[in-house]
Amino acid sequence: CVRVQDAIGFARLLLSPDPARLATFDEAQASGETKRVTTGRNIGVRLLYWTAFVDGQGRVAFREDVYKRDAKLADALGIAVNLPQVVADAPIDPDEVTP
């Protein structure tokens, strides 16, 4: 499962190179019908899973490792680390997260 912040806008962006497909998508949206509209081309997708990142103020921030990958990665790299313990959930502000 992957969350997309603006799914309709993202779909329109992917379809924008082909006006006919974009029109088909817009018509389906307007009618409320369920319809499959493909882009007509392969689009590479890269999913990144980050539990540590630099926030908008330049500080290192951490999120809970829900998939428990950090310890396995550290072990595979032969690194002894003291991983941070999450003591409270904080809302994620997409404007603070930078690649």
Image (cartoon, rainbow, N blue to C red):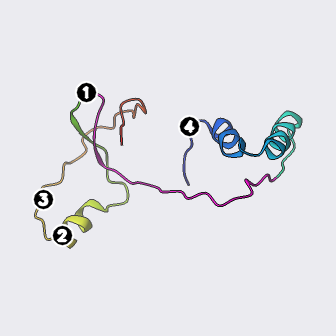
Based on the displayed image, in which of its 4 quarters is residue 33 positioned?
A: top right
Would residue 11 be found to the left or right of residue 84 on screen?
right
**Residue annotated with mark 1:** 57
Of marks 1 and 3, which one's residue comes earlier in the chain?
Answer: 1
For mark 4, what is the residue? 5
Dot 1: within a 10 Å radius of its alpha carbon, few (fewer than 14), some, or many (20 or more) residues? few
Nearer-the-camera pick, 86 or 96: 96
As measured in the structure, the alpha-carbon distance from the residue carrying label 3 to the one carrying label 2 is 11 Å
Q: Is residue 15 left or right of residue 87?
A: right
Camera-nearest label, 3 or 4: 4
* x then y, percent, for residue 73: 25, 66
| Residue marked by disc 3 | 81
User: For the residue labelled by badge 1, is the local secondary structure a helix, a strand or a loop?
Assistant: loop
Question: What segment is highlighted magenta in the picture?
Answer: 36-57
Q: CA distance from mark 1 to mark 3?
A: 25 Å
**Residue that sits furthest to the top in the current view:** 57
Task: Examine the image and state in which quarter residue 1 appears.
Answer: bottom right
Residue at mark 4 to residue at mark 2: CA–CA distance: 34 Å
Residue 71 position, x and y percent, is: 23, 63
For this view, does 21 lie left or right of residue 78?
A: right
Label 2 environment density (alpha carbons within 10 Å; few <14, some 14–19, many ≥20): few
In the displayed structure, would residue 41 be above or below residue 16?
A: below
**Residue 37, relative to residue 69: is it above or below?**
above
- Which residue type carries mark 4? Gln
The overriding secondary structure of the stretch rendered in magenta is: loop
Q: Are marks 3 and 2 in contact (CB under 8 Å)?
A: no
Mark 1: which amino acid?
Gln
